[in-house]
Image (cartoon, rainbow, N blue to C red):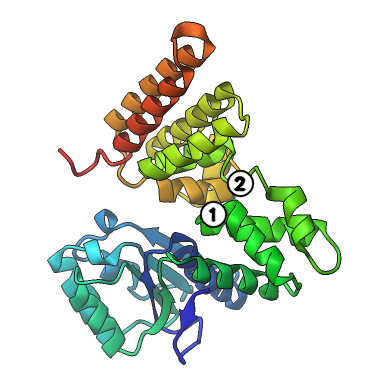
């Protein structure tokens, strides 16, 4: 679970979420937004990427309003901000505005360390969101998820869930929530076995999610597991198509609240948030390349090629590369 500093006021003027674990970073943001909206239901939330924060943007967003509205300003990947924008942020840290909560998401490390140090020196509330690379960390995460939901699970059940689901914290959190919703009493290893053994990371949507996030190695691993456990290739191409089309739809849509975009694009609000995370790095050309790759794979698995598995692997690699097309020139 994310670790927090002693200053645990969710409405502190500045929250600094440090690390590379996307689920924990997203939760840090959601906690602040929920607290702000509990204080003021009309809280305005601005969720920005570095390219959306230019010199002067922060001053504009945090300037006094005639309506004195509460506002949450989220800046993702703060380590990638331009030097001039970093100057603006550092100046703001010295005199934060009332009724404004600034949330800085920073990967940690050497890049952008000056901003990281400045936020800490200014007394920012800090949430640690480290990447969980060790099985023991993921096991502790699962135990924490059950505790957080007020339920008990045996040590064997927690271990079985980690073994079944693997390294994706979103999948682990979702699995815990599903078990808690469905099962009464203590959750044991037999229950986990019924639900997840043999199905972990084998769904077509897991393959698609890893591919559109640019995580080629993990996408290929999920693909091979899926095929080995009997997932139909046509289901995988369908999921890949949905994933790429969602990226294309959202990237061409006008900015707005998730609820508004959900109505416009025909997606649930939670999916808007997820696709927003996935679409970083994509370009219109990348979407076009990925859609062609999906079409070729679809033809391959429906009899147009000799090796459906190869067709899917080729598509997954092409999509993952397309997801990293921005910035490569």
Q: Nearer the viewer, residue 11 or 108?
A: 108
Mark 2 vs 1: CB contact within 8 A: yes
Q: Where is residue 13 in the image (x, y as percent from the top left)?
A: 40, 83
The kind of secondary structure element at disc 2 is loop
Name the residue carrying label 2: 200
Residue pushed farthest top? 304
Q: With 119 as the anchor, is 294 left or right in this view?
A: right
Mark seen at residue 166: 1
The kind of secondary structure element at disc 1 is loop
Instruction: Say how many tags the image has.
Output: 2
**Residue name at image x 30 percent, y 31 percent:** 286
Whether residue 73 is visible here, answered yes or no, is: yes
Q: Where is residue 267 in the image (x, y as percent from the top left)?
A: 58, 39
Q: Which of 266 and 222 is in front in this view?
A: 222
In the image, residue 128 above or below residue 320: below
**Residue name at image x 24 percent, y 74 percent:** 89
């Amino acid at each position: 679970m994310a670790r927090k500093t002693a200053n645990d006021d969710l409405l502190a003027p500045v929250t600094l979420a440090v690390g590379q674990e996307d689920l924990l970073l997203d939760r840090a943001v959601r906690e602040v937004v929920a607290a702000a909206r509990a204080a003021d239901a009309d809280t305005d939330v601005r969720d920005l990427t570095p390219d959306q924060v230019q010199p002067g943007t922060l001053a504009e967003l945090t300037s006094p309003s005639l309506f004195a509205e509460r506002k949450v300003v989220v800046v993702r990947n703060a380590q990638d901000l331009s030097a001039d924008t970093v100057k603006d942020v550092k100046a703001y840290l010295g005199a934060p505005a009332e009724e404004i909560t600034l949330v800085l998401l920073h990967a940690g490390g050497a890049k952008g360390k000056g901003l990281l140090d400045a936020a800490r020196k200014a007394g920012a509330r800090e949430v640690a969101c480290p990447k969980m690379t060790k099985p023991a960390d993921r096991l502790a995460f699962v135990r924490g998820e059950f505790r957080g939901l007020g339920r008990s699970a045996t040590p064997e059940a927690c271990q079985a869930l980690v073994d079944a689901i693997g390294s994706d914290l979103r999948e682990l959190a979702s699995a815990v929530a599903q078990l808690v919703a469905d099962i009464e009493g203590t959750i044991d290893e037999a229950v986990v076995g019924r639900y997840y053994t043999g199905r972990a990371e084998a769904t077509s949507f897991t393959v698609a999610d890893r591919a559109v996030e640019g995580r080629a190695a993990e996408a290929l691993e999920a693909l091979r597991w899926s095929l080995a456990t009997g997932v139909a290739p046509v289901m995988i191409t369908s999921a890949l198509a949905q994933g790429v089309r969602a990226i294309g739809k959202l990237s061409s849509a006008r900015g707005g609240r998730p609820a508004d975009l959900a109505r416009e694009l025909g997606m649930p609000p939670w999916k808007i948030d997820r696709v927003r995370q996935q679409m970083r790095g994509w370009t219109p050309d990348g979407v076009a390349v990925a859609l062609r790759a999906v079409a070729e794979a679809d033809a391959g698995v429906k009899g147009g090629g000799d090796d459906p598995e190869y067709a899917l692997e080729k598509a997954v690699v092409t999509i993952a590369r397309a997801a990293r097309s921005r910035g490569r020139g």
